[in-house]
Amino acid sequence: MKVSCPFCGNVCDDINFDGEVEREKLCPLGESKLTREKKRIPYPMVEGERVSYDEAIERAVEILLNAKRPLLYGWASTVNEAIRLGVILAEKVGGVYDTTSSVCHGPSILATIEEGLPGGTLGQAKNRADVVVFWGCNPAEAHPRHPTRYSVMVKGFLVEGRRLRKTVVVDIRKTATALLSSKFYMIKPNSDFAILTALRSIINGNDSAVPNEVGGLSKSQLREFAELLLSAKYGVIFFGMGATHTRGQDRNVEALIKLVQTLNRHTRYILQPMRGHFNVTGADAVACWEAGYGYAIDFSRGYPRFNPTEFSAVQLLRRRDCDAMLVVGSDPVAHFPFDVVRHMAKIPVIQIDPHYNLTTKVANVVIPSAISGIEAEGTVYRMDGVPVRLKKFRESEFWSDYEILKAMLERVVERKGGDVVW
Amino acid sequence: MVSLEVRNGFVIDPMNGVFEVKDVFVKDGRIVESLDKPEMVVDAKGKVVVAGGIDVHAHVAGGKINMGRKMRPEEMRYPRFKSDNLRSGVGRVLLTSPAIGYEYARMGYTTVVEPAMPALYSIHTHEELDSIPIVDKMALPLFGNWHFVFKFVKNDEIEKLSNFIAWVLAKTKGFGVKVVNPCGVEAWMFHGNVYSLNDTDPLFGVSPKEVITGLISAIERLKLPHSLHIHCNLLGIPGNYEVTLETIKLTRRFENSERQVMHVTHVQFNSYAGESWKDMSSGAEFVAKEVNRNNVTVDMGQVILGHATTMTADSPFQYELFKIFKTKWSNLDVELETGSGIVPVYYSPKVRVHSLMWAIGLEIGLLVDVDKVVISTDYPNGGPFYSYPYIATLLMSEKFREEEMKRIANVERYSILPSLSEERTLEDVVKMTRVNPARILGLNDRGHLGENAKADLVIYDLPPEPNPRDYESILKALSNPSLVLKDGKIVVKEGRVVKHTWGETIWVKRDYDEELIGDELEDFFNYYTVQRDNYGVPHVRREVVLC
Amino acid sequence: MLILRPKLSFEVHVEAEITPDLAEMDLKDVLNFEVYYGKLVKRLGDLFDVETVGEGKRVILEGDFSRVKWIGKGMKDGEIVVRGDVGQHCGAYMEGGKIIVEGNADDWLGTEMRGGEIVVKGNAGNRIGCNFWGEMEGVKGGKIIVEGDVGSYVGEKMVDGYIEVGNAGDFVGTEMKGGVIVVRGNCGYVGWDMKGGEIRVGGRFDLPPSFVEENGVWRGDVNVGGKGVIRKL
Ligand SMILES: [Zn+2]
């Protein structure tokens, strides 16, 4: 059978499995996830002591119900079925639902709120794109099969492979992807916003507003770049952390969107964020249909409210505005700034994760789970939102995220009353 | 509770010719002839009893509405339901999934069709449908710009096309065949569109006319319960009523004694005369006449003045809208299959074109034969579905229309609505919201209260023939049913949702021979970015399969 | 006139939509006024000491209000004086009256305000005088004066009114349609995609490459056919 790879936002679904995962189609990232075993959490624990699943879940529910503002964080590394229960759990305990988006592609979402997203599926890049731009992203290393499956060497319906496709990399250093590309623009750090705006000015015929040099590119380079963009019959711009995590952040993405809007007056273009975790897109989508927003959602008033500068995990922890935390499939202790982690040490923390990580060290309740895509099945959304099924191909003694969250929800409703609503 | 009697209500059940005071009995979720000892008796004296409403066309689930939510948090700042015993629900026009189910139930609707499912995203569409409580639902996969379809149509391979449709319905758990701007969406991939039924797509060289007739042939061959469901070419553009007339005329080659052979959806948006926005006027009269003399049905696509979000698979049209409104714009090109776009709008009563759209919808509602037209807003394109009681009241009361026309831009020179004195009766409204949708969809277990029908039942605090001049009471009663039963369970009391239940997902199964289209599948899946094995919907919450 | 003081140091932030209207209510109703402590619904009297002092539609907030949000939300008249710092969303949707913050203000000061005046003696956070997420229009009237410095995103989509600050962070007056923003000190990018209005800067600033210089001022944003003006103070 074919299995899907639960590592990055590519979610490659063509991995052969025949009692064992065939390595041939795996990239190094997928190989480490699918074939190498990291240190597992061996059993449920409360304050470091081994307990049963029931006892751990009971304690977790007690913590969430007693907290004034519990934060339920993570979600990008599990399946939609579990995420959905997570959103409902956050609602039922009057807490906050936030995802790893708030520290990775949050800026893309904020820009989408401003402008919408002119997008398309990855197959559009494969089949039609004769110009592909990688802006501040490096798929050759972060999404290794992206170039061969979707964007550079792949043979498409109208574009038969690399020779007929111009690939452009815009970055502050010569990346591995830049080596694959037909054109590389090295720009000054933190100049994405200005360059994108200059390109838009040129394409709009407002050349006179553009100074002689912007972000390390001369005006003639900028004109040439604009011409290259306009030469496409169908263009795709992929962007990554180089755009979202440098000066401008969401404004950089907004500038990208506005550039793509402008390009569509002349030819066809789509824009696609290179999203990291395999289901960060699902974590966002499920919350949108269940609660109206993708992340940073507060349920303290009994209905959802949204504000990333108020209800995102980093903001809540930094402002000491949460008094309990549930972490699902994520390691905030390793990834959050120190002043933020400090508050985690002061409040009760519950962890649901297959693997031992730094967050395990501060967690008061630790609940081990089956690995999604290996030991548990479910739906995830690829970076372009295309749903892909993750398969289960190994038995496990551990409960799945879905089973754990369902048991938690059942207990919450048992205590609080109300219909079974999931 | 498994059995219940609704006593002394005035039953309006046009499908069974009932228009009288009559008791209705419910057992195990179905209507039964009689009951010895009902476990519960509901007194409906002085009220009317009707079947649950059916929406044939509302974009309630899937990538489009969800992208709408994501890009429009300003739409979600309106709390409707607090968590308490049920789910929370928010939204202005775009609603969260729980709010969609609750709001439908609150106005006595128990079935809804999601009319635009890209097959590649069918898992997502069904995940969302599975999260909408109470109502039953269906989804129509999009066929009008699919490379497979173009290829089969080009080669005139109707048998293969039929096989393909059956394969898709099984893979996506789909209910019927939807077409949106046939060939135009593929043309948009090349920055173009099509402008007549004979224009061709740039890749396969097939025309909308060929795609439409090819698909109808296949659908009729498969004897699908629902006909072709079409969003016509040139939607939303002044002068488009002519292409609508031509599209309708394409049905003359086909016969079907049980149902229509084409359902033209949200026809208001395709009933514009004139040549530009400046001189746009209503073409509804012409469209209504053509509908009335052909085996075709329509839903209104009524515009509700106020906020809305346009979202269609008609991606070139959506980009045109974006150029007009210069607000937000989302687009999704779906490999090999289809596309879509989203643009927020505000239909202003002060803007003539918007007021005219409002008037054209009502002309359609009044001029099309009462057996051929269904109330809709093409949610959320024309406005909220929860405005159906408002639309029904407008159709029932000339006085209400006069009042409403006082607050909108003058449309007298462009629409005949001000001169129309037609008034639909309550029984007509029951046809337009229950009987017709059930017949159009080919569902015989709903839309009526005969024996063995689903016990989806609504009690309104209205006399059977309400006074049209007292439109306020009509609107109030239609908006707040005294009681709503879904599958025999009380889900709404006095306009409040009291129970969270889950409805069914209905899909249509027809035999197919995968071998027959094996080469084509093999070929096209080289260009998909998902594996053929992984294509399609593995399961849904509760399914009913029509074989 | 009322004086409010927190009774305890708050474990999580409190949401209290305190307006000068409270000063005209019976003390009993003031004490019963609904506030939110995390997910707990509380009465004002549970969390704050309330003292009545003389007449006047004024509310004085004494002690630490830095963890209290939504002070002055939608207020129409009267006055609020915060004798210290104040939490997020202060003066949001305000229509009239005056708020004086003697310390610092947090993010979202004066969101979508339509009238009235907010004066902050200290600094303020990000997104002051902005639209809330997704809304098409920001501040439509009134005045925000911050004597200290502010963070990024000032006066987004502003339609009318006046905002004055010391130094500002990045992106001042993005997609502005009207009104005036004054940055007395330095700031980052100004006026991107502005359609109208005026931004005056005293110190250094970054100009997006979409403005054209004309008689010592910059006009744009050319990409939206804007008639906005950026000038040096
Ligand atoms: Zn539609």
Image (tube, helix red, strand yellow):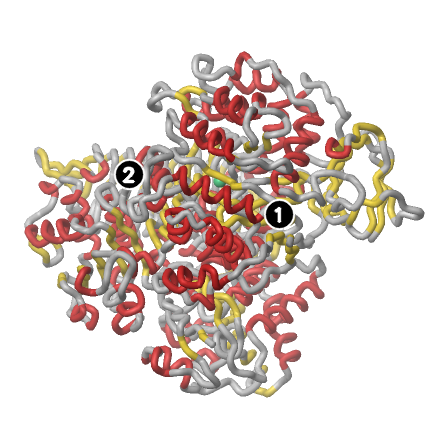
**In the rendered view, would you say A351 is above or below B543?**
below
Locate residue B111, reporting x and y percent: 64, 44
Amino acid on which disc 1 is placed: Gly
**In the rendered view, would you say C222 is above or below A216?**
above
Say which residue appears at 40% left-offset and 63% top-offset: B519
Mark 2 residue element: loop
Q: Quadrant of residue B24?
A: top right
- Residues under numbered marks 2 and 1 in contact, where contact means CB atoms less than 8 Å apart: no
Locate residue C207, reporting x and y percent: 16, 46
Camera-nearest residue between C230 and A260? A260
Say which residue appears at 71% left-offset and 45% top-offset: B445
Q: Quadrant of residue B444?
A: top right
**In the rendered view, would you say A392 is above or below A299?**
below
Camera-nearest residue between B221 and B299? B221
- Few, some or many C-alpha atoms within 10 Å of disc 2 (few <14, some 14-19, many ≥20)? many
Q: Is mark 2 within 8 Å of ligand 1?
A: no
Say which residue appears at 47% left-offset and 67% top-offset: B534
Instruction: Point out which mark residue C176 bears.
Output: 2
Locate residue C72, reporting x and y percent: 47, 42
Instruction: Point out which mark residue B318 bears.
Output: none
**Is A130 placed left or right of C74 in the picture?**
left
**Is B155 placed left or right of B84 in the picture?**
left
Amino acid on which disc 2 is placed: Met
Locate residue A252, reporting x and y percent: 26, 54
Name the front one of labels 2 and 1: 1
Q: CA distance from mark 2 to mark 1?
A: 39 Å
